[in-house]
Image (cartoon, rainbow, N blue to C red):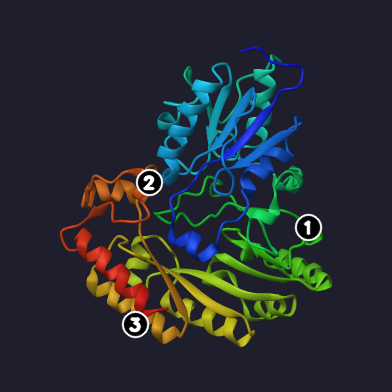
Amino acid sequence: MKVRNTMKIALIQPEVPQSEDEDLLGVYPPIGLAWLAGNIKEQAQIVDLRVTPLEIDNWDVVGISCQTVSFTNCKTLAETLRDELDEAVIVTGGHHLIPEELLTFSDYVVRGEGEITFKELLSCIEGIPMSPILGVTSHGGSNPDRPPADVTLLDPPDYDIIPLEKYCPNEGAMVTSRGCPYHCVFCTSPFGAVWRGRTPSQVVAEAEILLGKGAQTLHIMDDLFTYERERVLQICEGFHSLSVAWDLPNGTRVDAVDQEMLTTMAESGCTKILYGIESGVQDVLNKIRKHVTLAQIEKAVSMTKNAGIEVEGLFMVGNPGDTPKTIKKTVEFAKNLDIKGHFSLATPYPGTDFYTWVKTYGTFLDVPYEDFEQVPVFETFDFSAEDRLQMLQWASAECK
C-alpha cells in the first residue's frame, strides 16, 4: 500500500437489520466511531450507511464497525471496497466476538475498545516502528488483549464530523462509562468486566457540546450509569445547572439505585429509566447470573416511581430455564409492577456463556446472523422455536 503524507481515513457504520432496540431507541449517531475519530491524530470521515448512501472516496484506511447482526452487510461492504480500493487497508471491530470471522474480509481486527489500538495501528500502517499492538488480530495471528482503557484519559467523541441533524431531532446520545462487573450469561459488551466512568466534569462538558448542537434531550447509553453513586450525584448537579432533560434508555440495574439518588436524578431532569429486568422468575434470574431478586426489582421500580421518574422494563423470552410457563409468570410480574415491558428474544451470541449453554442443553437452528434478533436461533426440548416466537408476540402485546 502506498500511503500519502496525510492518510485518508473512513470510519463506516454499515446498515443494520431493523430490531426491537431500534424501535425502542431510534437511530442514534455512531458514538463508537465518533470516539475513534476523536482519539486519532488524523482527520477521519464518518460514513453512516443507515442514514446516507455510500460514496467511495480515495481512502487509504477504512474502519468498519461490525455487529453480529450486520455481519453479512459488513462482508458485502468490505468486498465492494476491496474491488474499488485494492490498496486500501480494511480494519474491522465492534460488537462481534469472533475475530477470525471478521478476518475473512479484513486485514486487521481490533478487539475490544478501539481508541488506543486503532491509533497505534494507524501509526504502524504509516510505517512508524511499533512493538506488537495489543488487541489486534491479523492474518499473522492474534496479539494479547489490551487492558481496559482509563476512559478519563481519552479525548471526547468528535461530534463535529457527524451530521447530527440526520438523526433523532433535538436529541443527543452519549456514553459516560464503560464496562459491567456482573457477568450475565448473555452479555456481548466489548467493554469488559471492569467498570470505568468519565469524570463528572467531562460528562457535563460533553453534554454542553451536544446542547450547543441543538440537543434538548440527552440519552445516556451506558450499560451501568448508576454504578458509582457519588459520580451520579455530581453529574446530576451539573445537569441541573444545564436545565436539560435526560434519560437512561439502555437499561441499568435495579440494585444500583437508591431513593436519594433517584430523587436527585429526577430533580436534575431525568425523565425515564429502563431497567434490565429480564425475567419475573427467580430461578431464571439465577440461571442467567443476574444476581438480583424479585424483591429488589419491586423496590427499585417503586422508588423510581416515587421520585417521579417514568419506569419501563427490558425483558427477554428464552433465557436458560425459560418455558412458556415462566414467560406467563414474567408477564404477570410486569403487570403487577404496572410498567411498560419491552420484550425481545434471548439470543446466544457466539463467544458468550449463553452460546456455550445452548451447545450443551439446546439445539441451534440454521439462522443467518442478520436474523439473530428477529427469530429464535435455538430451541430446547421444553421450549420450541415456534413457542418462543408466539410467546414473544403475546408478551409484547400484553405489556404495551
Report if residue 384 is visible in the image.
yes
On screen, 150 above or below 314?
Answer: above
Where residue 196 appears, as percent x and y from the top left, is: 65, 52
- Looking at the rendered structure, the kind of residue marked 3 is Glu
Q: Quadrant of the N terminus?
A: top right
- Looking at the rendered structure, the kind of residue marked 1 is Lys
131 or 219, which lies in front? 219
87 or 80, which lies in front? 80
* Mark closer to the chain start, 3 or 2: 3
Q: Residue at the spot x=81%, y=57% of the render?
A: 205
Disc 3 or disc 1, which is closer to the eye?
1
Give the spatial CA distance, label 3 vs label 2.
Answer: 32 Å
Where residue 209 appears, as percent x and y from the top left, is: 80, 56
Asked if residue 320 lies left or right of residue 294, the reply is left
* Residue density around tag 3, few if under 14, some if 14–19, many if 20 or more, within 10 Å: some
* Residue density around tag 2, few if under 14, some if 14–19, many if 20 or more, within 10 Å: some
On screen, 251 above or below 66?
Answer: below
The residue under label 1 is 213
Disc 3 or disc 2, which is closer to the eye?
2
- Looking at the rendered structure, the kind of residue marked 2 is Glu
The extreme left residue here reads: 381
Q: Quadrant of residue 99?
A: top left
Q: Secondary structure at mark 1?
A: loop
The residue under label 2 is 370
The residue under label 3 is 332
